[in-house]
Amino acid sequence: MKIAHLLVLGVACCLPLAASAQWQWLDKDNKKVFSDQAPPPEVPDKNILRRPTGLTPRVRFSTAPAAPDAAASAASAASPAKPSGVDKDLAERARKAEEAEKAQKAAEAQKVAQAKAENCTRARQGKATFDSGMRVARLNAQGEREIMDDSARAAEQQRLQSVIDSDCK
């Protein structure tokens, strides 16, 4: 039984050594990329910063650069580069922040639309009151009630019509 425990302990101690087999290189945007897989072939050897221990540099057999297919280059240009490693997390956070910003703008737009609808309703009701020919009174600066004359009624009708024109669309 002791041998089994020692064997399990030995294997557990060796696991971190296998986990340290990490590649590190600079991508085309000079960002550090960490991975447990080798970098793509288009990454030059000078940009590889760290290899897992015991590995030799990559050997390239081509003497002349191969002409890329038109279809392959069009496909690579059409699809955006996928982020790797930590960049995936960053891209996900950026996407969530964009969605939150869009939701906030939509909420603000909805509030503005609701306020315009309320203004439209009030302006239509006020216009209907002035068009009915009823006497309308207002309070002046001293708090006294004053009945509006024809010129004040016309000015208020014109103001209400401009509110209706701007808010009732």
Image (cartoon, rainbow, N blue to C red):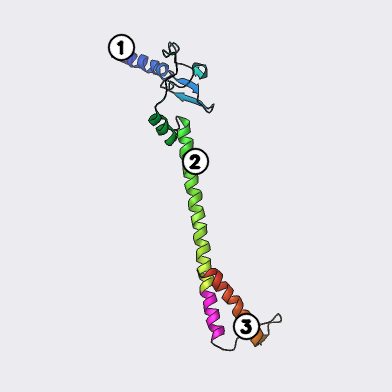
Q: Earlier in the sequence, mark 1 or mark 3?
A: 1
Mark 1, secondary structure of its residue: helix
Q: Residue 12: x percent and y percent? A: 37, 18
Foreground mark, 1 or 3? 3
Residue 105 makes an appearance in the image: yes
Foreground mark, 2 or 1? 2
User: In the image, which residues are magenta?
Assistant: 121-132
Residue 127 on the magenta segment: yes
Gap in Å between the C-alphas at discs 3 and 2?
Answer: 54 Å
Q: Amino acid at mark 2?
A: Ala
Q: Residue 4: x percent and y percent? A: 30, 14
Mark 2, secondary structure of its residue: helix
Q: Amino acid at mark 3?
A: Ala
The residue labelled by disc 1 is 3
The residue labelled by disc 3 is 154
- Point 30% across, 12% down: residue: 3
The residue labelled by disc 2 is 94
Q: Going by the image, does 155 lie left or right of 103?
A: right
Give the dominant element type of the magenta stretch: helix, strand or loop. Answer: helix
- Point 53% across, 66% down: residue: 115
Residue 124 marker: none
